[in-house]
Amino acid sequence: MYFDSLEALLAMEGHGPYVWAAYGITLLVLALVLSAPGRRRRRLLREVRGELRREAAHGSKEAAHAPGS
């Protein structure tokens, strides 16, 4: 193996903090990019459900107030 110990791997001859920060930021961005469509889908479905509920409530109020009911 290139590094003699885990400590040497983490330190990377003084470059470790930069290298590991770059890996961490990359993984964070990838996680956000991959999870965005699911979050967007859930938000859209929640909005559509709310619209359908409002339309149903509005429709039932109109039916109750319609002439001849």
Image (spheres, rainbow, N blue to C red):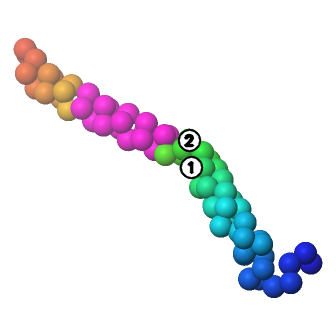
Vertical relation: 3 (above or below) 57: below
Report x, y in % for residue 32: 56, 49
- Is residue 4 or residue 30 the one in the foreground? 4
Residue at the extreme bottom of the image, as rendered? 5
Q: Which mark is residue 66?
A: none
Secondary element at tag 1: helix
Disc with the residue nearer the chain's start (2 vs 1):
1
The amino acid type, in three-letter code, at marker 2 is: Pro
Residue sitting at x 71%, y 62%: 19
- In screen coordinates, is 67 left or right of 23? left
Give the residues drawn in magenta, as a range.
40-56
Mark 2 crowdedness (10 Å alpha carbons): few <14, some 14-19, many ≥20:
few
Q: How many marks?
A: 2
Q: Which mark is residue 32?
A: 1
Q: Is residue 53 magenta?
A: yes
Q: Which mark is residue 37?
A: 2
Residue sitting at x 26%, y 28%: 55
